Image: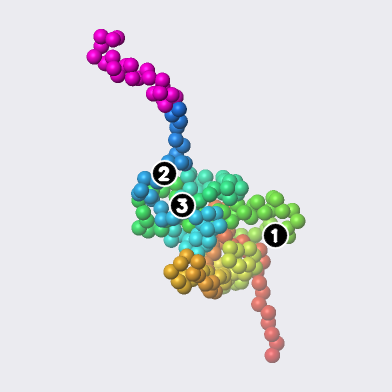
Amino acid sequence: MMGSVFHIEIDLAGHPLLIALDSNVKPNPSSTIPDSGHPNYQDRVDFDGIKALCSERGAQIVVGFAGGEAALRQSDLKQLLRQRAFKWDVAAGGQGNKQAVNWVAGNRFIDIVLSLEAACTGLNEPSAPVRIAAQIPKEDLEVGAWYSGKGRNGDVGLWDGEDFLVLGLEGKKVGPDRSDREDECRIKREPCCTVDEGCFQPFAKLVPAHHSA
């Protein structure tokens, strides 16, 4: 091979230093690849932060989660707690290009997470108060009636035929910093809990008290 025009390149390829560098190459996992400079999300927050954002802004935002709703429903709560950061963006006019299958609407994300937490509480805290298992079916609810139950923002709701109206607290921005927020009372809508969606579980109809003159 010494007569080849490439004998210099061949000699260099066999140099011990190059061989050592070649053998030291390791695959770079996708989780450690730095951002390209063109992210498709607005920010990253921890588990408590994404729950707060979803509770406050609902369907106005989307949360990045590989596999979407189906994968989120199958997630272990401890796995979610261990995840260091959740990507989120506004639902309308967000940044970059997104694969819809890997993004979950904020209202759906919080509903699923709360259902996972409720299931975890029921399994791991036997000393907790026993919850009534028999929820009133949606078709048996009376429009204009008040119900006690278990909701995201409160445990008493007025059924209007579509959702429960529940009085709850909502954060209001009062300054330039993210921490500049104050809570104020708002009437919030909570869909009736079903197998696939919703967050308010009605357990008992409240009968108004009648006062005699």
Seen from the viewer's position, the closer of residues 105 and 20 is 20
x 52%, y 58%: residue: 49
Residue 18 occupies which quadrant of the picture? top left
- Label annotation for residue 132: 1
Judge left or right: residue 73 versus residue 95. Answer: right
> For numbered disc 3, what is the local secondary structure?
strand
In terms of sequence position, does the residue under pointer 3 or pointer 2 come before the other?
2
Q: Are marks 3 and 1 in contact (CB under 8 Å)?
A: no
Where residue 10 appears, as percent x and y from the top left, is: 32, 16
Say what amino acid the circle numbered 2 marks. Answer: Pro
Q: CA distance from mark 3 to mark 2?
A: 15 Å
Residue occupied by mark 2: 34
Q: Are marks 1 and 2 in contact (CB under 8 Å)?
A: no
x 44%, y 58%: residue: 61
Q: Which residues are magenta?
A: 1-23
Seen from the viewer's position, the closer of residues 29 and 190 is 29
Say what amino acid the circle numbered 1 marks. Answer: Ile
Tell me the chief SS of the magenta region: helix
Answer few, some or many: residues within 10 Å of disc 2's Cα (few below 14, many 20 plus, some between 14 and 19): few
Q: CA distance from mark 1 to mark 2?
A: 49 Å
Judge left or right: residue 91 versus residue 81. Answer: left
Residue occupied by mark 3: 87
Q: Nearer the viewer, mark 3 or mark 1?
A: 3
Seen from the viewer's position, the closer of residues 159 and 40 is 40
Where residue 11 appears, as percent x and y from the top left, is: 33, 16
Quadrant of image for the C terminus = bottom right
Judge left or right: residue 193 versus residue 204. Answer: left
Judge left or right: residue 198 versus residue 93. Answer: right
Quadrant of image for the N terminus = top left
Query: Up-down: is 53 above or below 20?
Result: below
Q: Is residue 14 visible?
A: yes
Where residue 173 appears, as percent x and y from the top left, is: 47, 70
